[in-house]
Amino acid sequence: MTDYEELLASAASGLPGQGGVAMATDAAAGAFEAIRRAADAQAGTGTGLFAAWMMTAAEAADGRDALTQAVTAMPALPSSGPQLAPSQAGSVARALTRLLCAIAAQASHPADAAACERAAACAQRIGELLAQDTA
């Protein structure tokens, strides 16, 4: 289990509750940023998967940015965090999808639910992109 998967699991254990939601959206934004950085780094390695990694980076940025539309649990945008190996991005994306779907289901404000649903969709697409490229 990666550092980010542990962080997301810890955040999920804090749900429900507004403090737990805020912690979870912070953790999710950090995980999206880690995926984006890993994908950006991997895109330039000449592995033949340039398009998939660039699409992953774009989805991660979209997911991170979607969370800023939350009204009651707007995350702090991460500036740094633990490094994520590209091979771990898919499992982190799957953990993000689960967490964000749980937050959306419990959201007390429609904008929070919409933001988390949009971010969960981005995380799901990341998981699908990376699953296709490792199959």
Image (tube, helix red, strand yellow):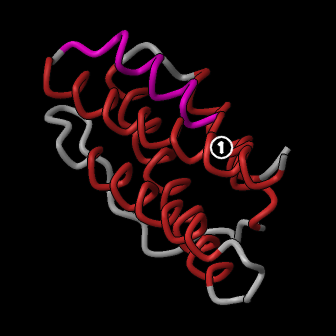
Q: How far across and how far down the image is residue 131, in percent?
A: 73, 44
* Residue at x 72%, y 46% (from the top left corner): 132
* Residue for badge 1: 7
Judge by depth and name the residue closer to the eye, 129 or 7: 129
Q: Is residue 96 magenta?
A: yes
**Looking at the picture, which amino acid does disc 1 mark?**
Leu
Question: As rendered, which of 122 and 8 lies closer to the eye?
Answer: 122
Quarter occupied by residue 84: bottom right
Up/down of 41 relative to 110, above or below: below
The x, y position of residue 34, in whole percent, is 58, 65
Q: Residue 130 versus residue 40: which sits nearer the camera?
A: 130
Location of residue 56 in the rendering, given as x and y in whole percent from the top left corner: 53, 60
Q: Give left or right: position of 86 versus 96.
A: right
The quadrant in which residue 18 appears is top left
Q: Residues within 10 Å of mark 1 (few under 14, many from 20)?
A: some
Residue depicted at 37% across the width and 10% down the height: 105
Question: The magenta stretch spans which residues?
Answer: 95-108
With respect to residue 26, does 24 lie above or below? above
Secondary element at image label 1? helix
> Residue 16, percent across and down?
43, 13
* Main secondary-structure element of the magenta-colored stretch: helix
Residue at 35%, 19% in the rendered image: 104
| Residue 88 against residue 125 in the figure, above or below | below
Q: Quadrant of the N terminus?
A: top right
